[in-house]
Image: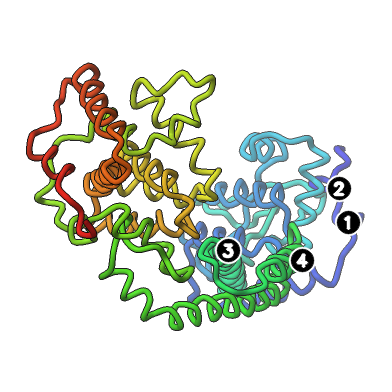
Amino acid sequence: METNIATTPFGRRPMTLGMISSQVTARAVPKDATVHKWHVFQDIKDARIALGATDRALAILDALLSFHPDTALYGDSELVVWPSNEQLIRRANGMPPTTLRRHLAVLVECGLIIRRDSPNGKRFARKGQGGEIEQAYGFDISPIVARAEEFKDLAEAVRSEKKALRLVKERLTICRRDIVKMIDTGIEEGVPANWGRVQQAYQAIVGQIPRTAPRQTLEAIAEELEGLWAEVREALESFVKTHKVDANESQNGRHIQNSKPDSKFESESRLGNENEAGGDVADTDNVRSLPKRELPLGIVLDACPNMLWLVKGGGGIRNWREFLAAAEVARPSMGVSPSAWEEARTAMGEQQAAITIAAIYHRQDQINSAGGYLRSLTDRAKVGKFSVWPMVMALLRAKLDASKTTGAEAAAVDLEAAGKVVRTESRLEISDALRRSLEKPGRGS
């Protein structure tokens, strides 16, 4: 006789209170009860940890349920299946006999099945003269019907807990992202606050997050982070409210070529003074009247000659690719963050953003916050109120005015050279109207 749990005589198997409880529950199943066995099995899978079942035990339960021919299980029907160990092993995708016996015992202990042993421990069914089953010995799956509501409630509780855990993790992720962005904004925009202390407080809270933790622990950490979030948010909002008047003025005031800033906030929307560069924001706003063609590289380099300092070996800038490389060097040297640069490239286009960087680099001594100023121009570009044409033309006009003031002709010669570069590389010439606009006296003349 095979000596395993499946065939050992009943008297040799230990009887536990859990088994007795399962049998009592199975006998109490209402006769009119009906369940969908695979729906109940899904609830059991979701509540597996709460029930104390293992993954392999559920694989065996799946196989046992498949041996019952009906999908719907009724409380008044015979719910005993009697597969052999070999059949179970094949249908459970294969496992050693010792593993099978161990996990069958788990199913019994969890009250998911009940053993119905024959006198000799074999599994079989005895049929009557008409072929109907009179007595079956094997595994009774009636707890699937009797405990269906219990399994459903357990599964719903587990699903609710998983959802709550997922939500608190989302809260943590969003809060962490927002705090980092706000700290970056506060530092970049020059908001008065002890940002070093804020960063330390943030790191201290985040350092408490374990790899795996119960929802209650994460809830407590999320509340701490949200408190810090509220502090940082309040500091930024207070700064915005305090400088609201300046912000409104900056939107209606001079642009890159306008008056030298008197405050930190103003510096983010102004570069030079009116006499130095000429023009105003209205020129920039009237984007529709600007030339549709792209600015020639020669003109841009003539307006922003400082970009040539960034070329390795002093070889000059021969094409737009080299110009973009120089802009990539200028950006970090001015303290422009990668996020501000990426946002500008998205809103303006890579070439236009590089020209904007070149103009800011040319007048960086007159700007308190290059990053903040770039963000301001990016916001205007998003609504179609910014173009690099007036900005570059203003720089060229300022250069031309300066040459007239000193009596030198170098600037005019350089401008003529820029036109030659344009004709050589881009096959574009400076129009007479454009040349006249550059040579006309500025407002301060």
In whole angstroms, how far apart are the C-alphas of marks 1 and 2? 7 Å
Label 1 amino acid?
Arg
Find residue 421 and report its horizontal and vertical position in percent.
25, 21
Left or right, 58 with respect to 427, comes to right
Residue found at x 50% / y 82%: 238
Between the C-alphas of marks 4 and 3, the distance is 25 Å
Residue 177 occupies which quadrant of the picture?
A: bottom right
- Ranked by sequence position, the earlier of labels 4 and 3 is 3
Q: Is any atom of residue 277 visible in this view?
A: yes
Residue 404: % across, % down:
26, 42
- Mark positioned earlier in the residue sequence (3 or 1): 1
Going from N to C along the chain, the mark reached first, 4 or 1, is 1
Q: Are marks 1 and 2 in contact (CB under 8 Å)?
A: yes
Q: Which amino acid, by three-letter code, is at mark 4?
A: Gln
Distance between mark 4 and mark 2 Cα atoms: 53 Å
Is 130 positioned to the left or the right of 101 in the image?
A: left
Name the N-terminal-most of marks 3 and 2: 2
In the image, residue 95 above or below residue 368:
above
Residue 187: mark: 3
Q: Position of residue 98 (x, y in %)?
A: 83, 40
**In front: label 3 or label 2:** 3
Q: Which quadrant, please, contains the N terminus?
A: top right
Residue on which the image places disc 4: 208
Secondary structure under tag 1 reads: loop
Mark 1 Cα-neighbour bin, 10 Å: few <14, some 14–19, many ≥20: few
> What amino acid type should be assigned to the residue bearing mark 2?
Thr
Cα gap from disc 3 to disc 1, whole angstroms: 72 Å
Which marked residue is nearer to the observer: mark 4 or mark 1?
Answer: 4
Q: From the viewer's perspective, is the residue at label 3 or at label 1 nearer?
A: 3
User: SS at mark 2?
Assistant: loop
Looking at numbered disc 3 in the image, what kind of residue is underneath it? Ile
